[in-house]
Each structure stands twice: as structure tokens, then as C-alpha cells.
Image: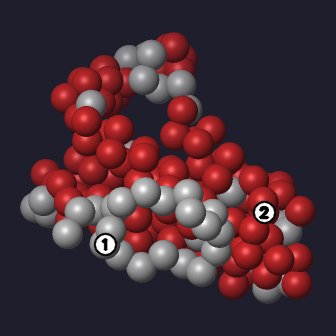
Amino acid sequence: MSHSQSGAVCPGGGRLDIVIDAFTRSTLENESQQRTMLRLSLEADPAQRGDLPLRQGRGIKWIDEALAPLETAMPESERQRLVLAVRSATGIEALVWLTDVAGLSSDEAIDVMRRSAQALLRSALADDAAPKAVAAVESLAAPDARRP
């Protein structure tokens, strides 16, 4: 089973799942470069880290766009915390830990990252159980957007 077909998706979390699938696939396809950039970013002066080419926040932008329907459902500060939480659980840093430390295969690591993203979304929505959140999560579903 491929990582894009495994794992449970939070109801309404289709947009997020599509982004996480693409983001993690990109991370795997460029793993060597991603690991090098991670190492360089850890060695760089903190003031210079943002200038590194692969440390420009592309993943954050993708996740933010996926969660855009939540803009009217939760305070901006909470949505941004959700974006950052999802990104922290899904990038090269998480992949390195899950494969190198936890000993998971790449596919298993991708599945854990996808499940983590969905769990974070479910938790954020449970914290803000207002009717607006329910309507917003319904709009997160992206029918027919997934391809086998």
C-alpha cells in the first residue's frame, strides 16, 4: 500500500491530506538535499538561517493554504499555531527522527506524519467546537482532488 493510500483522514481534512502527501513526497524525493540543508541550517549563524534556499517556509505556505477555510472559523493566532504544529510534525526534521532514530521505513514515517497532521487538525477543531468550525471543516474536503 502506498503512503498516499494509507492512514485515516479526518473528516473534512482532505485539503490538508493532499498537501501533506505532496509535501512529504517532495521531502522524500529530495531527501539528500533536504538533509544537507538541515545540517547547514543547524550549523549556520541563527541570523543567517532564513537565507538558506531550502529554509524559506515553502511547507508552511502550503499548509497555510490548505487550512485557509479555517480563517473564519478560528482566531488567526490559533490557525497559525495549527499551521506551525502541522509543519513541525511533517518536514525533513520529522522524517530524519522517524527513520534514523525510531527505525521506521520511509513509507511508515510518511504514514505517521500524515496521521499526525490529521490528529492536530482534529484537536484544533475540537478545541474550537463553534458552528463556524464545523462549517469550515466541511469546506476543507476536496472531492475528486485526490488521484490514485
Task: Report if residue 47 is visible in the image.
Answer: yes
Residue 65 in the image: x percent, y percent? 68, 46
Q: Pick the quarter of the image with the C terminus.
A: bottom left
Comes first in the chain, label 1 or label 2? 1
Q: What's the CA distance linking mark 1 and mark 2?
A: 25 Å
* Amino acid type shown at disc 1: Ser
The residue that mark 2 highlights is: 70
Classify mark 2: residues with Cα within 10 Å, few (<14), some (14-19) or many (20+). Answer: many
Front label number (1 vs 2): 1
Query: Would you say 80 lies left or right of 43 here?
Result: right
**Mark on residue 20?**
none
User: Which residue lies under the disc numbered 1?
Assistant: 6
Image coordinates of residue 135 in percent, x first then y, are 83, 77
Q: Quadrant of the N terminus?
A: bottom left
Nearer the observer, 148 or 98? 148
Name above or below for residue 64 compared with residue 82: above
| Side of 95 where 90 appears, left or right | right
Query: Which residue is drawn at the image coordinates 63% and 63% (left, top)?
Result: 142
Residue type at mark 2 is: Leu
